[in-house]
Amino acid sequence: MTREPLRPVLYDDARDVVRVLDQKRLPVDEVWLELSTAEQVAAAIKDLTVRGAPAIGVAAAYGIAVEARRGADVARLRAAAELLVHARPTAVNLAWAVRRMGRRIGLGAEVILAEAHAIRDEDEAACRRIGALGAPLIPPRAHVLTHCNAGALATAGYGTALGVVRAAVEAGNPISVFADETRPFLQGARLTAWELHRDGIPVTILTDGMAGWLMQRGEIACVVVGADRIAANGDVANKIGTYALAVLARHHHLPFYVAAPWSTVDLGTPAGDAIPIEERGTEEVVTLAGQRIAPVGVPARYPAFDVTPAALVSAIITERGVLRAPYDASLRTLAAE
Ligand SMILES: CSC[C@@H](O)[C@@H](O)C(=O)COP(=O)(O)O
C-alpha cells in the first residue's frame, strides 16, 4: 500500500497556522497541533513536540512566517527570531534557518512565508538526494543499525539516515533496520519504529546496550545515523549514545555512516569540543512512562547529545556528495561548490 509521505511540519496558508505532528504522543496517538505564535512554536521545539535537527529549523522558519502573516512588525519579528534561535542549542539547523529567515525580515509577509516554504521544500529534496547517494553504500540484504530518529519525522520529510534506508528499499535492496530505543525520550522505539512500520520497512527494536553483542555475532552490517551539527573537522554531534555505537562499529570493523543535509554542517565551529551540548532536565531519566524507577535523592544526568570524533566516521552523506576523510578538506571542497 502506498501511503502519503510523512511531513511533520506544515504551514496552512489559508488559515495561517503552523501544523505539527505531536511527537510526544506518537506512536499511541497521531495528533496534529496548530500553532499561531512564535512563542507556541518555540515551546513545541523545547518540549520535543517537534524534534530532529532539520525539522526544528523548518518549524522555526514557520514560527517567524506565522508572525509575519499575522501582522507582526519588524521589531516583533526580530524578537520572535531571537526567541526561536535559543529554543535548543545543539542542532545548528535551527540557527541556520533563523539566520536565513532574518535576511527576509522587512521584505513583507509574502516574501517571509515564501522563504519558510523554500526551507521546507529544500530540506525534503536534500533528504531524497541523501537517500539516493547513500543507498549504494548499504550492502545487499543488510541489517542496518540506527539510533534515535533521523527519519521523516526529524526532517521536512523522507529523513536522512532513514532516507538512506528508504532509498535502498526503493532501489530493491530488501534491508531491515535495528532501531536503538534511545533512552530517555525513546525516539527509536517510538518514532523510528513507528515510521518504518508505517511504510512497511522491517524494523526490530533494541535497547541501547544491545548493539555490541549483535555486532559481535555478525548480525549488524553497518550503522547509519543522523547529525545535529558537523564541525569543520568532521566531528559529529548527534543523539547521546551515538559515540558509543561509533566505537563499537570501529571495534567490529563495520562502516559507520552519518547522513545529514548541508544545513547541519557548521564550518564556523572548528571541532566537536566547541559544539554546545544540551543538558535537559533529568525527570525523564529517573522515570519511565510516568513511573519513578530510581531512588529519590540520587542525582541523574541527561546530556542529550554526544560528539563522535571524525576519525570514527566512515563517510558523511550529504546532498552535495558523499564525503570521506580527511573531512576538513572534503568539507571545505564541497562548501566552495
Ligand atoms: C535528521 S535528524 C538528526 C538528529 O537531529 C537526530 O539524530 C537527533 O539526534 C535528534 O535529537 P532530538 O533530541 O530528538 O531532537
Image (cartoon, rainbow, N blue to C red):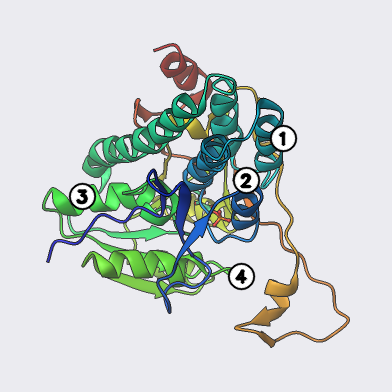
Q: Earlier in the sequence, mark 3 or mark 2?
A: 2
Q: Which residue is mark 3?
A: 168
Q: Earlier in the sequence, mark 4 or mark 2?
A: 2
Q: Which mark is residue 79?
A: 1
Q: Earlier in the sequence, mark 2 or mark 1?
A: 2
- Nearest to the eye among marks 4 and 1: give it: 1
Residue 140 image offset from top left, x and y in percent: 17, 53
Residue 189 image offset from top left, x and y in percent: 45, 72
Q: Residues within 10 Å of mark 2 (few under 14, many from 20)?
A: many
Q: Secondary structure at mark 3?
A: helix
- In the displayed structure, 277 sits above or below 204; it is above
- Nearest to the eye among marks 1 and 3: give it: 1
For the residues labelled 3 and 4, the Cα–Cα distance comes to: 29 Å
For the residues labelled 4 and 1, the Cα–Cα distance comes to: 32 Å
**Does the residue tagged 2 have its C-beta within 8 Å of any atom of ligand 1?**
no
Q: Which residue is mark 4?
A: 184
Q: Nearer the viewer, residue 265 or 145?
A: 265
Counting the numbered discs, the total is 4
Q: Are marks 2 and 1 in contact (CB under 8 Å)?
A: yes
Q: Are marks 4 and 1 in contact (CB under 8 Å)?
A: no
Q: Amino acid at mark 2?
A: Ala
Can you say which quadrant of the picture contains the N terminus? Answer: bottom left
Residue extending farthest to the right is: 297
Q: Secondary structure at mark 2?
A: helix
Residue 258 image offset from top left, x and y in percent: 43, 42
Can you say which quadrant of the picture contains the C terminus? Answer: top left
Q: Earlier in the sequence, mark 4 or mark 1?
A: 1
Q: Residues within 10 Å of mark 1 (few under 14, many from 20)?
A: few
Q: Which residue is mark 2?
A: 38
For residue 122, side relative to residue 310 (left or right):
left
